[in-house]
Image: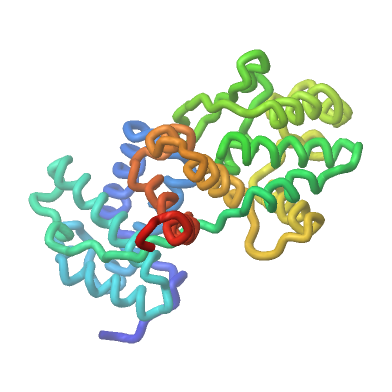
Amino acid sequence: MSSPEPLDSPAPLSPCFQAGLEDFLQALRVEAGLARATLRTYEGSLTRFLAWAVRRGLTSFEAIEADSVVDYLVYRRGAGLTERTVAHDLTTIRILMRYLVFERVLTRDATALLPSPKLARSLPHGLSVEEVERLLAAPDGTGWRDGRDRALLEVLYASGARVAEAVGLCTNALEPSLGVLRLFGKGSKMRIVPIGERAREALLHWMENGRRELSGASTRPEVFLTRTGRPLDRVNAWRRVKAAALRAGLTGKISPHSLRHSFATHLLAGGADLRAVQELLGHASIRTTEVYTNLDSEHIQSLHRLYHPRS
């Protein structure tokens, strides 16, 4: 096998590949309702594969064999990509091939007999209840920025929202009398989640006070804004969480997702039903939520040693 080219080596797609890829992405956009970020991930992954195929003289989907897909995955692994990234490459290629068979562009799926790699399921990083309390208390000033950051942190932990869901929160998404939020997740799917009194108060205080001080706030639907009145984006939300973690004296990789993980872990540790947590997190599959059942194993073992008569 020839030495690998740079991963970003340009190669125009053949007309066949270009047309098939565009049709596939359109189907994902219209029929599956996938989010833009997910579509861009699919497009990037498949464009790299099809450009690689063109460089090897393959210009039609019929020419792609199982060996071609295996060679590409080996090439990607040899170029230093992680097993998880390579597994995602195979998943996107497999979904494309199944779509082409369904649309009768192909008569067979070249990936049908390829086994999916078995990956170790990494446990998410969560915070203890005491660490969460310290983090939420970090923005303790009276200015608009601390008011916004306090509301953002409270919402992330109280609702288990993804960071994109939190920064996309609109002013009409809160039902103060009911203490619930309307969140729009992947594929613009809406779910209603309850929030506690502290989160509700922090959110209302921000919306009724600090937010109104910002330029153009009255014309923006988004809850969380910057000093210039622009919507807070995911990158800046990540920075605000990191800044709060530093103020709280917390170390490690703490991000908005850490609060989502902590939300799920603390609910399950408190006896919440796994299906209920799945609904609150907006997970399409219960398998995604099941990873949290492994997080408290050390605590469970210590309880067993302490209380079981034959431990």
Q: How many marks?
A: 0
> Where is residue 92 drawn, in percent x and y?
31, 54
Outermost residue on the top side: it is 177
The quarter of the displayed image where residue 34 is located = top left
Residue 200 sits in quarter = top right
Q: Identify the residue shown where x is 29% and y is 48%.
A: 19
171 or 25: nearer the eye?
A: 171
Judge whether 178 appears above or below 95 on screen.
above
Residue 153 lies left or right of residue 183; in this view the side is right
The C terminus lies in quadrant: bottom left
The reply to whether residue 50 is visible in this rendering is no
In the displayed structure image, the side of residue 311 where residue 167 appears, left or right: right
Q: Report the front residue among 149 and 71.
A: 149
Q: What percent of the width, then of the height, locates residue 15? A: 29, 54
Given the current orientation, which residue lies at the most extreme front position? 309
Front-lying residue, 157 or 62: 157
**What sort of colour scheme is used for the picture?**
rainbow
- Residue 53 left/right relative to 290: left
Is 171 situated above or below 250? above
**Image quarter for residue 169?**
top right
The spot of residue 219 in percent (x, y) is: 76, 22
**Residue farthest to the left?**
107
Residue shown at the point (36%, 80%) measured from the top left: 78
For the point 71% across and 49% down, which residue is it? 236
Residue drawn at point x = 28 percent, y = 55 percent: 17
Q: Would residue 144 be found to the left or right of residue 50 on screen?
A: right
Q: Quadrant of the N terminus?
A: bottom left
Q: Name the residue nearer the viewer: 309 or 249.
A: 309
Q: Is residue 311 above or below residue 143?
A: below
User: Is residue 106 among the parts visible in the rendering?
Assistant: yes
